[in-house]
Amino acid sequence: MDASLPAHMRPERSFQGFILALQRFWAEQGCVILQPYDMEMGAGTFHPATTLRALGPKPWNAAYVQPSRRPKDGRYGENPNRMQHYYQFQVIMKPSPPNLQELYLKSLAAIGIDSAVHDIRFVEDDWESPTLGAWGLGWECWCDGMEVSQFTYFQQVAGFECAPVAGELTYGLERLAMYVQGVDRVYDLNFNGREGEAKVTYGDVFLQAEQEYSRHNFEHADTAMLFEQFKMAEAACRKYLDAGWREGNRKEHLMALPAYDQCIKASHVFNLLDARGVISVTERQSYILRVRELAKACGEAWIHTEAGGAA
Amino acid sequence: MPDLLLELFSEEIPARMQAKAADDLRRMVTDKLVAEGLVYEGAKAFATPRRLALTVHGIPARQPDLKTERRGPKVGAPDAAVQGFLKATGLKSLEEAKIQRDPKGDFYIGLIEKPGRDAIDVLAEILPVIIRTFPWPKSMRWGARSGKPGSLNWVRPLHAITATFGLETEQPDVVKFEVDGIEAGQTTYGHRFLAPAPIQVRRFEDYEAKLLAAKVVLDPERRKDAILSDAKQLAFAQGFELVEDQNLLDEVAGLVEWPIVLMGSFEPEFLKTPDEVIRATIRNNQKCFVVRDPRTGKLANKFILVANIEATDGGATIIAGNERVIRARLSDAKFFYETDLKTKLEDRLAKFEQIVFHEKLGTQAERIKRIERLAAEIAPLVGADVGKATRAAHLAKADLLTEVVGEFPEVQGLMGKYYALAQGEDASVAAACEEHYKPQGPADRVPTDPVSVAVALADKIDTLVGFWAIDEKPTGSKDPYALRRAALGVIRVVLDNQIKISLREVAREHLERSYGKQYLEVAEKLDDLMVFFEDRLKVQLRDQRARYDLVDAVLNSGSLVQGHPLVVIVRRVEALGKFLDSDDGKNLLAGTKRASNILSIEEKKDKRLYHGAPNAALYNLDEEKALAEAIDEVQVEASAAVAKEDFAAAMSAMAKLRPPVDAFFDKVRVNDDDPKVRENRLKLLNEIRSATRAVADFSKIQD
């Protein structure tokens, strides 16, 4: 931890200081610090900086915060740590550096988790995303019995082998910050590190949103529109993918990113429909499959682009 | 003789894979050594979260020289043949060859000596192959090398290899090899946090000692012992008792290199949640142990965690952190439990109409209806109240839809009981919600309450009949619906409770009534299902080290396929077993077998059967007459006893056959010169065989 930081910027005092400390740490490791992707998605992994950039031979090191939307996890702001919107901090390094575990542990030190007094453990957790056609091996990282991060060596993304393999770290920011700040309820997190009048809590920023979006996600989201949107996104994705092949031959693709946006869209719309309970168990599987097909086709296009193709 | 030390140092290996990996490493290396002619004295393998280690001691320093003889051409053979021989054997000239004479002439013999190689060179060759082909259940690629094909696969990134070979008294050598850019050497590392510095090691003894100094307990058994004794101690010191849990202990020992056992607590108010739910929460989610109050047997508001570090604050932060997580988890569990209590079990059932049990067997709701009907049928046969059995079958599956069971599937049934009691159900009905799943395995208890028995049988028989109806039977090692366990469960419930029912009759009615007649070949399916039960019975008896071969011996006289009750068959097997343990039984068995052997030899020779009644007029020896009389008498007596299911009496009747059979073989020559007498005597032998069939087919009994 940087001792010169003013109190309100210290990671154990403020949520924003906590995020900045992580960003600064990973910037020091040579990562590009990106801003959140401007679309709704269920996890930082969906960001094209991870999903697409994990494919292809070119090195890529990036870190960013990604707001993650899980419509089903909404609890009307009544659960101390479950929300339909929360932040993930995502790090991706391709190829995975040999000291990625050490870097991760140092990043914990940078946010005030000292391995001399905390019990930090790497507990088996195989990661799989059926919607992204992706899987990898790694761990849940435990700190004193609490899962604080996900650590994965991507083996396959969008149905393609990762060569070389990228290492991915995902920090659950609120949960970690709650631990570091010592609060039991996410809405009590000190957001800006100030005290008294000037203090802004996580609840001040997000509680109303949690209540409103829970109503929306579970009760009012317009399912007719959403069903339509799913179809439209799926069709648009296919259309852009078809149109993107230069001169119609499948050697070079020029629109992988816009096509992938539609895949992200379809995935989120599906999550909303799922939260509204209008998708039956059997249909559910087929929707997941449809999104996966889009993701695979986007991956295929991506590896024929400049950033995703051969070095 | 020299020793090998091998260590594969990696990122954290999943706990559940460690024991098998250590075993595989030992097996693969030692098998290969033996195959290379290097017979070792002993080997032991170890695993921690970050390393697999192997020590093999007493390996010969060199392979033995191999000498083989190769036969060459005849003396005087053409030059081309001679040259070919010299080339193949590496001899310089025929002078170096021996000449050997055999009936076909004189031949050159070349002696080829293949000198043994140094064991260290052999190791350098086999170890990288073993590492590259190691059978991890799941393995992965990593780092820059994974961009190229052929990169190493390992369970998690492999960082270092230690491989040394040498005598105890000398500085050992490094076994020189390289796998995917990792050179084997003598450098390993201590505990990730407590002693991360590199360590130079020479051989196993200093390796294990240096690791211990670097806060790594290499041997998983030592870690387990330490955890268990510290955990017991800690619990005892506070007046509690550790709830032991072997699986959890195995897992936890695979998560730490330096186990530190600590105790934390939670708010006593959580103890209102059932103990099993608390235990499942703490165990499954947090991998911590629970403790109980030895006076009441109830859980205490404490838990035991195993950390991987000796913290500078004595563990206070770690305990506080774990307590926070456990508090949150328990409050979730408590919330689930209390939420569950707000809905009556029967109010959950409608949902089952949407849940498919099996695409060909319909929804869970349909299945529950079938079980209800069957439980009502079975109830009077097992002395259960029909109303209670139906009610229990109605509610028994409802807890599958509760929050707690959704979270912790292992408490299914048990929660059903708690919720049933909470809503004021009859005690037997509530018990059946839990017990109808029993027995789950060989160590599990068999239900005895008649209501539980009725529902347990109905549940299992419905499952079996259903899957038989649609022809989804277990094959080989594939038994996805655990049908073998279900059949064995039926057998144990029936036998332990001495229920005299015809399984075939029950299954037939259920198949026809509940699955309709659209399934053809009802009789065939029932035959097949009953044979499946008979096979399970044999397995069950074999596992109890009972005479399972006797099952086949009695099945001919009355089987499940024929609709005989299981308890009767088993009583018959037991009576037969007792009889065969007696001298009379042993001798009669020997006599019957002898009769059968003679018969089959003669029948084969004469190409005819000697069936049919013997002619009394042709008996010319007393022993013949005595045997014939005894057979008549015994047959009547034994059959009458069998009809009364008094198998002990049937066996005592059989025992009367022994003296006349013995006397017959003693005095009577079967193959008499007079063909008529011979035929008659063979027919009499056949009578022995048929008489014994009244109790069992003796030919099916193994000696």
Image (cartoon, coloured by chain):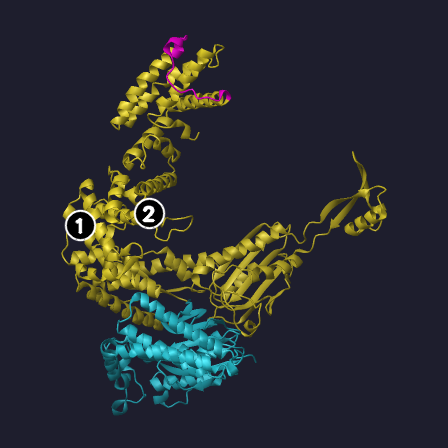
Q: In the rendering, at what x and y percent does residue B240 appear?
A: 28, 58
| Residue in view at x 35 percent, y 86 percent | A16
User: Can see residue B439?
Assistant: no
The tag earlier along the polypeptide, 1 or 2, is 1
**Pointer 1 chain:** B
Q: Is residue B354 magenta?
A: no
Local SS, label 1: helix
- In this rendering, which labeled residue sits more in front, label 1 or label 2? 2
Q: In the image, B610: left or right of B435?
A: right
User: Can see residue A197?
Assistant: yes
Q: Is residue B31 above or below residue B104?
A: below
Q: In the rendering, at what x and y percent does residue B129 appear?
A: 59, 60
Q: In the rendering, at what x and y percent does residue A247 appear?
A: 52, 83
Local SS, label 2: helix
| Residue in view at x 46 percent, y 82 percent | A243
User: What amino acid does circle 2 point to?
Assistant: Trp
The shade of chain B is: yellow
Residue, far bottom: A198
| Residue in view at x 33 percent, y 70 percent | B322
The shade of chain A is: cyan
Question: Which residue occupies the foreground of this view, A57 or A252?
Answer: A252
Q: Is residue B82 above or below residue B682?
A: below
Q: Residues within 10 Å of mark 1 (few under 14, many from 20)?
A: many
Identify the residue position indicated by label 1 in the image.
B390
Q: Is residue B606 magenta?
A: yes
Q: Which residues are magenta?
A: B605-624
Identify the main secondary structure in magenta: loop
